[in-house]
Amino acid sequence: MSNQTASSLRYLRLAIGLALFGVGLGLVVLGDFGLPPWDIFHQGLAEQTSLTIGIAMIFVGAALLIALVLLKEPMGVGTLANVFVIGLVVDATVSIGNTPTNSLIRMLCTLLGPIVVAIGSGFYIGARLGPGPRDGLMTALDRRGVAIWKARTLIEGTALACGLAMGGTVGWGTLWFVVSIGPTVQFFLRLLDTAPHKGTTA
């Protein structure tokens, strides 16, 4: 395989991964049984403004992008694409889904959401074109002496607390996402990545 073909495939993986990531998060939003910590924050921000949840994601991602530049953290095309693509896809998914009222459909959306996110992560991480801005913030703290697990807990906990204060939705879907996302990402990364090694998610 030529270098040009290999490079094109990486960009294709990135595009597919980010699109699926956004669809998965959109499904969780449609389910409305509780969101992941960061998306509780995004939803809370949307509740307090005239923004959609997807546009709120973009604004938060852009702010984190500026922070990463100031902190001189390494970034890539994937980092920039992450900021804009996922939020737009989330909004498109929510618009197409049109907020289902059937509880079974909502449960299905909530249950399938993390799995679709994990499939997207398998493609996205495998592209190796730059970390998501939220992971970039975590690694920035790590470089400054804060252990990864402490940095992750601090960031996720702060996002959760701020989101709840602004009216974001927490519920069993939040717990389901938290407990399911790690194992499913690991499974699909092994399945979809032809050269597996450590990477980052959104």
Image (cartoon, rainbow, N blue to C red):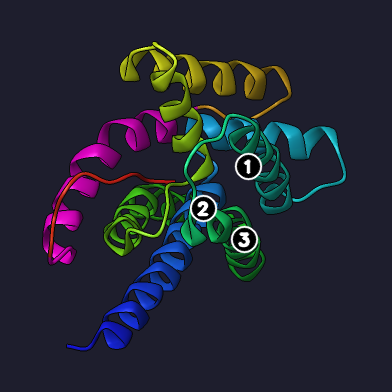
Q: Is residue 184 magenta?
A: yes
Q: Residues within 10 Å of mark 1 (few under 14, many from 20)?
A: many
Q: Which residue is tagged 1?
A: 65
Please report the residue visible at 33 percent of the width from the left and 55 percent of the height from the top: 121
Q: Position of residue 117 (x, y in %)?
A: 37, 54
Q: Which residue is tagged 2?
A: 79
Q: Position of residue 22 (x, y in %)?
A: 50, 59
Q: Residues within 10 Å of mark 3 (few under 14, many from 20)?
A: many
Q: Nearer the viewer, residue 96 or 148?
A: 148
174 to the left or right of 164: left
Q: Are marks 2 and 3 in contact (CB under 8 Å)?
A: no
- Classify the position of the N terminus by image quarter: bottom left
Q: Which mark is residue 94?
A: 3
Calculate the distance from the C-alpha at mark 1 to the C-alpha at mark 3.
25 Å
Calculate the distance from the C-alpha at mark 2 to the C-alpha at mark 3.
23 Å
133 to the left or right of 187: right
Q: Identify the amino acid type marked 3.
A: Val
Q: Position of residue 163 (x, y in %)?
A: 64, 25
Q: Are marks 2 and 1 in contact (CB under 8 Å)?
A: yes
Residue 107 sits above or below residue 60 on the image: below
Please report the residue visible at 65 percent of the width from the left and 60 percent of the height from the top: 91
